[in-house]
Amino acid sequence: MTNWNDLSLSAEMLSIIEQAGYKAPTPVQAQSIPLVVAGHDVLVSSQTGSGKTASFVIPVVEKFKGKNGTYILALSPTREIAQQTGAVFETFGKPLGLRTVVCIGGASIPVEKEALASSPHIIVATPGRLCDHLERGNVWLDFIQCLIFDEADRMLEMGFAKQIDTITEQIPKERQTLMFSATFAPKVEKLAKNVMNDPKQVTIVKTEESAPKIDQNLFWIPEERKMSTLMRLAQDEPGTIIIFAKSKERVYQVWRSLHGKKDDVTYIHSDLGQKEREAAIADFKSGRYRILVATDVMGRGIDVDDVGHVVNYDVPREPEDYIHRIGRTGRRGKSGAASTFAVPGKDDLGIKAIEKLRGIEPSAKPPERESRDDRPAREDRSRGNPRRGDAPKVAGPKTERSPRPPREQQGPRNPESTPRPPRKPTVPAEKLVLILREDLPAHRAAEAAKAAAAEAASKKSSGGIVGWFKKLFS
């Protein structure tokens, strides 16, 4: 097993690492740090939560300690990731006399301008905000010697390709470029060819030891049952919960529904001001709020230890986002749980894409939707409109129909002679618990099946609007 003494780091840096509480390097750190210290361009692919940030912060700070001037630029896709990266640079750089400036949307441009004018050693920025400063003439990148792309795949997914081109054109060609990404998507490989010079490639393959211990559950449920299922899950889960929804409007809707039942829930999305976003995350980290509702923009921006459960209230639009969402739990060797709510007939393709990305066989087919008319087709439908797809009737001579006798003259009905097939219930199919991961403990599956059976029994025993209200407010 590699230890920090094997990575060509100074005694001063080893002391800072020990004070920061980093016990042993992760695989990505052990393989990346020596290459960065040696001055190579490095292209790294490693899963979320594997320690990628320290993989570039530690060696870069080691290389540029004692120098005056702005030599390091790190680009991050979101405000939250930029702030967290800046905090790691402060942890390892400040004891060595290196100053860091973070430039993000929502912060004060005049304040950032003044900070940039002080010639910090390190700039951490989102591409959009850095381009704003470039257009205003608040910063020049002529002296940058190390360019870092953090979460490169996410930056490209968010549409920052043009901003990245603008930034790289103003940085000297003779530089060291480091690119860290959770996946080697085609766009990432294309960007690497354009901005890197003969990079050394590091790919950390998941192993049983390195893979997060996350019990992943898939629930096929209709849209109208999502909230009741979520409320029950929130009641049963004693730990912290992050709920991911597909839009800002959806986040507010989920928060409002939960807030009526629980006071320990907050929310965050891109429309909130920077101070509001920081306050929401700080309150969640401190334990003031146990539940956080967020959009996908937060999928890689929340770094909170001991998240007990991640809930995908909506199936993510991109399968990669699923990996980053559930990566908020089961971090640093701890176990966690993730639940995904999928609507039959709506989310089938999204679930298949997630399973394909994760390299597993489809777990099961989603339940069929209930038909609104389950009566068998009759050969002769003399009354009403023809069924869709029936052959059109051919016009013919009209014939006089004998008048129908009154009901009392028709005689008693004989149900035994013409039995009517029983109608299927029109309630949605019961919840199915499917496994998105083969190593889910058997007792968790048994518990889920037991909960589904209990819910079915409850539904039968408390039908109608009265039963619904009892269940809602119980």
Image: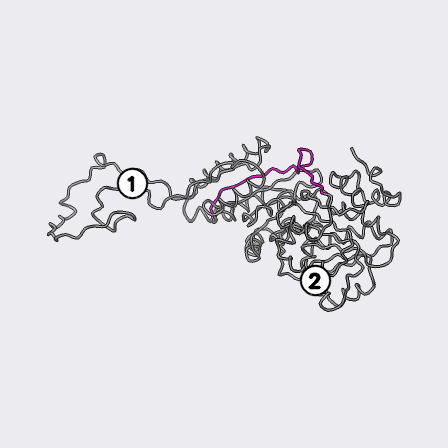
Which quarter of the figure has residue 143?
bottom right
Residue found at x 72% / y 55%: 75
> How many numbered dots are placed on residues in this image?
2
Reply above or below: 297 against 55.
below
- Which residue has dot 2 on it? 129
The answer to which of marks 2 and 1 sits earlier in the sequence is: 2
- Amino acid bearing label 1: Pro
Q: Are there few (<14), some (14-19), or many (20+) residues within 10 Å of tag 2?
A: some
Give coordinates of residue 415: x percent, y percent: 23, 37
Residue found at x 49% / y 42%: 220
- Amino acid bearing label 2: Arg
- Which residue has dot 1 on it? 376
- Give the spatial CA distance, label 2 vs label 1: 63 Å
Per the image, label 1 sits on a secondary structure element best described as loop
Residue found at x 88% / y 53%: 66
71 part of magenta stretch: no
Residue found at x 80% / y 47%: 39
Left or right for 27, reference 298: right
Which numbered tag is attached to residue 220? none
Give coordinates of residue 306: x percent, y percent: 69, 43
Left or right for 198, reference 214: right
Span highlighted in magenta in the image? 201-222
